[in-house]
Amino acid sequence: METLTIPKHIDNQDDRDYGFLRQVGLQHIEAMSSKLWTDYNTHDPGITFLEVLCYAITDLGYRINAPIPDLVAEPISGTKNLKDTFPTAKEILTTKPISERDYRKLFIDVPGVKNAFIRPNREQKVFMHCSLKDEVTPNDPKGKLSYENDFLPDYEKQNEFMLQGLNNIFFEMDSNLQQLEKEDPERIAKVEEIIKVIRETYHANRNLCEDLVKVEEVGEYEFQVCGDIEIEKTANAHDTVVEILLRIQEHVSPSIKRYTLAQLLEEGETTDNIYNGPILKHGFITDEELENANIQTEIRLSDLVQIIAETPGVASIRDISMMSCPCNQEGEEAPEPDCEPQENKWKICFPKGFDKVLKLCLNNSVINVFKDVIPINIDQEKIQNDLQEKFKEFNTSLELSYDDIAIPDGNYLNSGEYHSIQNDLPTIYGIGEAGLSPKEPVERHAQALQLKAYLTFFDQILATYFSHLENIGKLLSGNMHGSQTYYLDQLTDIKNLDKIIKNAADYDEDANAALGNLDDFISRKGKLLDHLLARFSENMNDYVFLMIDLFGLETKEASLWHKAKLLEEYADLGYNRGKAFNFNGTQHGVWDTLNVSGLQHRIARLLGIRDYSRRDMTSYYYEFYPELDSDPSDDPNDEWRWRIRHTDNTIMFSSSKHYDSMIEAEDELWKTISLAWDEANYDLLPTEDGTKWYFNLIDKSKEVVARHIQYYPDKTDAEATIKEYAAFMFDKVTDEGLFLFENILLRPDVEDSQANEKFMEICVEEDCEQCKPQDPYSFRVTIVLPGWTKRFSNLDFREFAEDVIRAEVPAHILTRICWIGSPLKEKIQEDEENMEPSQMKQLEELYKKWLQLKMESPQDQSGNTFLKPLVDLLHKLDTVYPAGTLHDCNVDGEAGTSIILNKSSLGELKKKENGSE
């Protein structure tokens, strides 16, 4: 079977090759008219026409080949920055930190930090206990989780697991701050400031399903070097010793060099490698620099010998030794080297998990210097002072910046300017600007007009091509401005055009109308957006096809908006794709906020959810109320109506009829909301006396589904209100959205005395075997969506949505997806009088209250009383399915009410009037 591939090199210059075009044109002429036309010499008028057309095509070809910045330049300013159309390298290639290296770069970029390390926290261990009782109750379940090894007398420990995704950050301060004493108030204040900035930086760039436990200054492990060094006769002893000690310290704890964009490009680094990682503030940091600055696991004497030998001015090494200092700066005994005793002379190595930076102890290190046999005295205090000055030089790189690659401004070329081919023909033809002499006979003038009319067809086709090139910036734009993809250019330089075109004054309008009838904007714009998305390896066609299949062709226009929005936000989506939301302080937004994870944002765009913010999905813009009858004895709940309010509480729409139940009213409301998005569904009418205007909302059958009770003195005022209402309903009154819960954030505070009572419920079998996975917190997310909406209640769309969600969630994260019920209330009995708040309403209220306290005190959940109710509710969430009915064997059930395993909820057989079932 032949494999079809897209060729990588498709560019040719045929459109700019006049000779090639003329040759191909002659071949077509010979193939079509060789029996009647045999003279193909240059004097033949037909060949002249061919040559003029070939020249016009080469003109178009050369313009097409102009630089992209020039082609998309705007005629008003004469220039256009491509940044307005295309993302820059800094915007599209960078990403929030994902790996350990990314985080280290981000923290090293903090002023005052020389180096930083991020390590998994191994201190939060959870134990699973199984009840020894025969009977279990909700208060005493079969299995419980606890931070304690020994829990309750009636429970026995079965297994344990370490919470994953928790991190510790250690930082090394720069040399300026290291000079300060540990107890110096300035140093203490600076350490606290750095900890605060690192914590804020981490939470602003936190990975999904991860959390920060602590930030600390890294410990130091000091060692000393002693030796006898002979230097060259011309060498300066003081400078040589300073250089030796500097090189040794930089070997065991290197300073991290920052680079400029120009330096990296000059070294041959590719653009994608340069911008691979988070955006920094103080220059670029390479992966090689980070790798060299890792915590050392050993010190080899042979390395120190090589360093000293390569130092300028050193002639020979007479003696050299190294050893651990008696104690480190914290006053603790140095750890026992992880080496065999006989190796200690040549190597100091450290146990696994050693997390301290190595530091040369200057006070204990002694370097004796000789010139031949003469010892040279050196000032140890001056050496230390000069060393500190040398270290300060490494901090100057903070003055660098993280530059972007400049995108050139375009120069407007007026690519759409077209000159008629008629003006390029010989004057004798009589159709150019000179025209024919009045002395020529009438028949000759008629022939010239006939030729002019014939060539005008070619002119209009060519002018339209040039017009499309002029508008290439609009065609390849990701936004939805405009409503056309065909562009017609006016024929302005054809003499006597009015003599060959009837109603020439209306020609442009008529031609545009004719071309507009061929312009399937939705389909053509969709293809252009697909092309742009394909450049980012994105494909929304599965979504579009499913929408059309399930909900009709009218969804194609809405799909355009979703494609355009994906393109518009693509740089942000790419940069934040692995980022979680920021809960480090309420200033980042608790509710009604776009402070959500990058995953939630991307899922919303791929599923066509317009509003991805964290907000109430049980909208406060609409309300239901019983219609009270004049007879007080009538049941007040037998008739229901609804209305939709604006933000200023004014009533926008009211239901056009009453409904027998709130559930029926609710179903009709969602249909009305979807109709209100489109201005075409607003029926604008004058009053009977014609003095005022009003409008209603109608469905496809022209039936009024909602009324707007207000009159407008002017039609334009009513039209403006319709436009405003449609935009408001589209942006605000939406019933679609999602909540994304990171289970790791729902763990109890380890310092909370009541922590054991706040763990999630777990599944435990009768034999005390825990259901898998055993850890309900680590790398787990719960995604909750409203299951009552028009799209989300469709099982085919749900299946598609779940496939998209699972494809987008990182592979190491386990996902639970819940489609929960009605936005209003849920029945607890057969009648509607006994109702309880819906799961979604309860979830919103608990989520909001828990999150408020969580963000007010990010590091301490011990006082968060809403944690346990929230995790209990999440545990109880049930996915809702369309109701089906188990029919009597003698009754044929409708297909729409069939029971499908795992995709239906049970209805019930109603009792008949005669009492039988």
Image (cartoon, grey):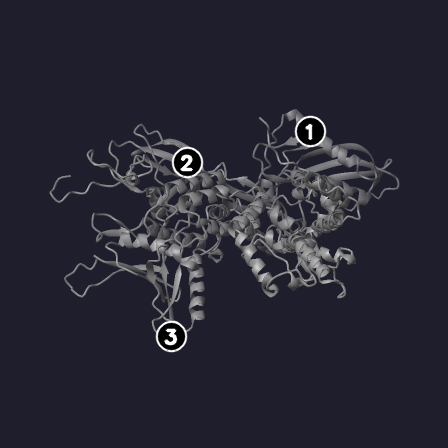
Q: Residue furthest left?
A: 914
Q: Position of residue 480 (x, y in %)?
A: 54, 55
Q: Are marks 3 and 2 in contact (CB under 8 Å)?
A: no
Front residue (pair 505, 865)? 505
Identity of the amino acid at label 3? Thr
Front residue (pair 874, 444)? 444
Residue at 58% x, 54% y is: 486
Check disc 2 and report its element: helix, strand or loop: loop
Q: Using residue 132 as the reference point, say whether residue 607 is left or right of it.
A: right
Front residue (pair 372, 159)? 159
Residue 256, by quadrant, is top right
Check disc 3 and report its element: helix, strand or loop: loop
The residue carrying pointer 1 sits among few (fewer than 14), some (14 to 19) or many (20 or more) residues within 10 Å by Cα, namely few
Q: Position of residue 55 (x, y in %)?
A: 74, 50
Check disc 1 and report its element: helix, strand or loop: loop
Identify the mark nearer the N-term, 3 or 2.
Answer: 3
Front label number (3 vs 2):
3
Q: Quadrant of the C terminus?
A: top left
Task: State the separation of the CA atoms marked 3 and 2.
Answer: 71 Å
Q: Position of residue 20 (x, y in %)?
A: 75, 42
Q: Are marks 3 and 1 in contact (CB under 8 Å)?
A: no
Work out whether residue 779 can be spotted.
no
Q: Residue furthest right?
A: 233
Front label number (3 vs 1):
3
Residue 429, by quadrant, is bottom right
Q: Which dot marks residue 691?
A: 3
Q: Using residue 530 as the reference point, say whether residue 608 is left or right of it.
A: left
Task: State the separation of the CA atoms marked 3 and 1.
Answer: 105 Å
Q: Which residue is mark 2?
A: 775
Q: Which residue is mark 1?
A: 345
